[in-house]
Image: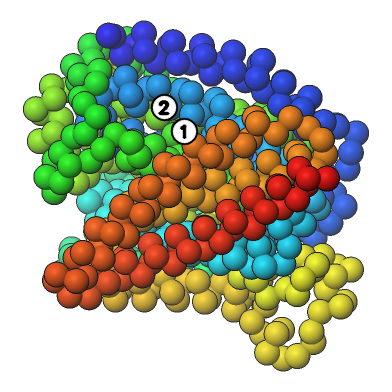
Amino acid sequence: MNGAILLLGSGVLFILAYIFYGRFIERLFGMDPSRTTPAHTQRDDIDFIPTRPSILFGHHFASIAGAGPIVGPILAAQFGWAAVVLWVILGCIFIGAFHDFSVLFLSVRHKGRSIGSIIESLMGYSGRIMFLLFCLLALILVVAQFTYLVVGTFLGVPAVATASLLFIAVAAVFGIFVYRLKVNFVVSSLIFVPITFGCVAVGVYFPLDLSSLLGCSVATARILWTIILLIYCYAASVLPVWILLQPRDYLNSYLLYAMIILGVAGICVAMPEIQLPAFAGWSVPDPRSGVSQPLFPMLFVIIACGACSGFHALVASGTTSKQLANERHVRPVAYGGMLVEGILAVISLIAVAWMSNADYLKALQSGNEVSLFANGISRFTLTLGVPAQTGMVFISLALAAFLMTTLDTATRLARFVWQELLLPAGNYGEPEDMKKLPTSAVWRTLSNRHCATALPVLTVALLLLGTGTNGLWPVFASANQLLAALSLLGVSMWLMKRGKPVMIALLPMIFMIATSGSALYNMFMNNLNLWQNKGFSAGGVLTLATGVLLIMAFALIVFGVRKLMQKNDK
């Protein structure tokens, strides 16, 4: 199989899905361009603000992508390239993109509320609290894991650190130009997009290496970068969306588009032959630990963001729905954004699939999937006349942009979830609801956006600086997929309540529960054995984490099934 044919074939299927299946979903849900969206009705210029679809797509895509569609397919390629491609294409079209579309649509129809608040209207107050607690734990894992990855990128490629910090300043100025000085959007883009790419060049010539600059150890530099990034996360969460989060994601999206275009062009010109086996077996040994991994459920958990991801529900209903100017933008932003992520997942697979199986497994032992991706794509872009080192640095910088946009969005979402947890039954933080809420100093303090941000950030700091992140990725991935299943459960209930065909959401939900639940249970049992045989430090923390997630997920599924059966009886 040729990599270029595989990529182009996947692209054609995604385009057809967007045109035909995307339109079918629009009709099913009843998309209405004449309805006024929450971005207009609840505009506060902090979280709610009508946004151009091009800017919103950039924010949404950059936030949902992260490292998932890159790390997942590269890790899962050990099962065989055909297995990866089938899950990415079918999962993306019929589960992931549908999931993202439906959650964004439901959030817009529910006044920009999060998926957690929508759950209350379907499962009751207890269901909402359980779901929000699950979301908060998942978001803390996201912020911790992605902070760890960003710090590692800063340490490994100091040019990325320089460019990333410059991006933040440039984005803030862009936001002021567009929203306060009212400079024409196109003119502002023509000025600031080149400046954004210029930051890449500055980073190459002036890499910010804290170890050399301060004369400290790598371990100390890691701690300093962790603190700096968490301070940035705090600021990105509490500042108005127009001054940092939205413009930074929009400008960074051009880096991401450029990376994808380079990857597609490089693969089409280089036309690499795929060397990895199409199918490596129903069970393969992990090249790092040697432990046997079954294709089911691990393939469907390892590849999350490239096929389906629960984190997308938090982005769609947390920040994107509050900025959507018109319902007609739901399909291009949500469904289209997920399909573009699917293309990135296929590119990521091809970035390692040209290697022999022995070389791939040996490279995988290094534990740096981001470097494998950058090396593979820079190899292809050599055919375009791009020097390997230049391509490597640019791709690493673009990947850092992916990670940073997911990081700051996840922190803001954690703030939203914390604030919603404090609201009594039937209250969602809307202006009319806020008048009925407790006025005690304690409630006002805990629900304040500064406190609501500080608490999750401090929890992440304790996790990173106290225990590290060993073993967090598989727990995060399983929790992420289980979150998608729970979101699809809510969508199923919404469809049933309105007498619409429910199997389109129910079947994907059952599949996601089966895969993610099995993976989480396996991790619980493995870590429990480690705890019993080697002590709490070996597996105690992950045993407790996976156990809590399983209990909450089981309770939510019971709530949901009972509600579905009640509606069915009627």
Q: Position of residue 7 (x, y in %)?
A: 39, 15
Q: Which mark is residue 284?
A: none
Q: Nearer the viewer, residue 53 or 122?
A: 122
Residue 238, can we see it? no
Rendered view: 442 above or below 231: below
Q: Quadrant of the N terminus?
A: top left
Position of 369 with respect to 427 (left or right) is: left
Q: Amino acid at mark 1?
A: Ala
| Corner quadrant of residue 287 | top left
Q: Amino acid at mark 2?
A: Trp
Pointer 2 residue: 87
Q: Position of residue 548 (x, y in %)?
A: 44, 67
Residue depicted at x 82% and y 31%: 30
Residue depicted at x 70% and y 34%: 502
Whichever of callouts 1 and 2 sits on the residue coming sooner in the sequence is: 2
Q: Position of residue 117 (x, y in %)?
A: 71, 59
Pointer 1 residue: 307
- Mark 1 and mark 2: Cα distance apart in space: 7 Å
Q: Quadrant of the C terminus?
A: top right
Residue depicted at x 39% and y 37%: 300
Q: Position of residue 492 (x, y in %)?
A: 68, 41
Q: Secondary structure at mark 1?
A: loop
* C-beta proximity under 8 Å, tags 1 and 2: yes
Residue depicted at x 43% and y 49%: 517
Q: Secondary structure at mark 2?
A: helix
Rendered view: 219 above or below 101: below
Q: Residue furthest front?
A: 569
